[in-house]
Amino acid sequence: MLGFIEKPHLPQSRVRHIIIGNKYRNTLENALIQNNLSPIWLRNNEFADERLSGHCDLMAAHLGGSRITVYEFLRNSQLIDNIDIQKIELFTVPNPTGKAYPMDAGLNFCLIGGKLIYNPNTADKSVVGKLDCEMIPCKQGYTKCSICVVDENAIITDDSKITQIAAANGIEALLVDKGLATLDGFEYGFIGGSSFKIDKNKVAFTGMIRNTYERNKIESFLSKRGIEAVYLTEDELFDIGSAIPLTEEIE
């Protein structure tokens, strides 16, 4: 039996459906299927920089349960058709008015349990207004890109300011080096854009963390919380704009 994940990024069992950018289909489809995941592929975002056109966190956001928000250009996508359980509550917002940051970052915020880490100047106000949670403002507009959600009280981030803000709000944050992930066309990618949960006790990484010290630090942080790191490919860790775990198996 399947059900929607009630708290964004925080499945309580094995994830089944996951929303991800179609740009990474050739690279990740086999690995996702091997992990019993059913990917829902989002078409490329023509309203973003071409280098970021496959980034899920610049196109959609899970608000909890059956509630999802997407940009208008995805209104008639196959998002709903791919889910054969209860109907998705799909909210649409106007497409970005420009491809450059910060205009592309309207849906790039991070829900963690009952808290929202976001940049009030970039996050879409109509979406934030739908959320009943503790608001934690920050200056990083690419908030979700910068955060790997571990559990309700822990994150991994490569942004030192987010580390401080999280700690001040009761969230333990492991600060890792910038540049652990690659992103074609840029100097480096982000840790949050390179990872997502696929089970209550598993965090998936798109590829290998080549920096042994940082990899051991991350694995130790996860292990203390009973969470396993799963490396989907043998490639170097790469930023895909993360993915959205949407449904999970319910006993």
Image (cartoon, rainbow, N blue to C red):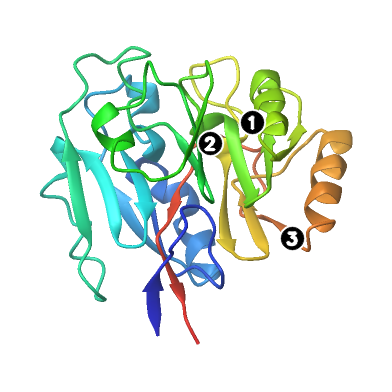
Say what secondary structure mark 3 lies in: strand
Q: Nearer the viewer, residue 187 or 218?
A: 218
Q: Are marks 3 and 2 in contact (CB under 8 Å)?
A: no
Q: Is residue 241 visible?
A: no
Amino acid type, residue under disc 2 in the picture: Gly
User: Relative to residue 75, is residue 22 drawn left or right?
Assistant: right
Which residue is depicted at the point 46% across and 53% down?
Answer: 8
Amino acid type, residue under disc 3 in the picture: Glu
Which residue is depicted at the point 50% across and 72% down?
Answer: 36
Reply above or below: 100 against 115: above
Which residue is depicted at the point 22% across and 27% down?
Answer: 46
Location of residue 82 (image quadrant): bottom left
Label 3: how many Cα within 10 Å (few below 14, some 14–19, many 20+): some
Circle number at residue 194: none
Sequence-wise, the earlier of marks 3 and 2 is 2
Q: CA distance from mark 3 to mark 1?
A: 19 Å
Q: Position of residue 111 (x, y in %)?
A: 48, 43
Say what secondary structure mark 2 lies in: helix
Q: Position of residue 90 (x, y in %)?
A: 20, 52
Label 1: how many Cα within 10 Å (few below 14, some 14–19, many 20+): many
* Residue that carries the numbered disc 3 in the rendered image: 228
* Residue that carries the numbered disc 1 in the rendered image: 181
* Residue that carries the numbered disc 2 in the rendered image: 193
Q: Residue furthest left?
A: 76
Q: Position of residue 177 (x, y in %)?
A: 76, 24
Say what secondary structure mark 1 lies in: loop
Q: CA distance from mark 1 to mark 2?
A: 9 Å
Q: Are marks 1 and 2 in contact (CB under 8 Å)?
A: yes
Which residue is depicted at the point 38% across and 74% down?
Answer: 3
Of tags 3 and 1, the one toward the viewer is: 3
User: Relative to residue 94, is residue 114 drawn left or right?
Assistant: right
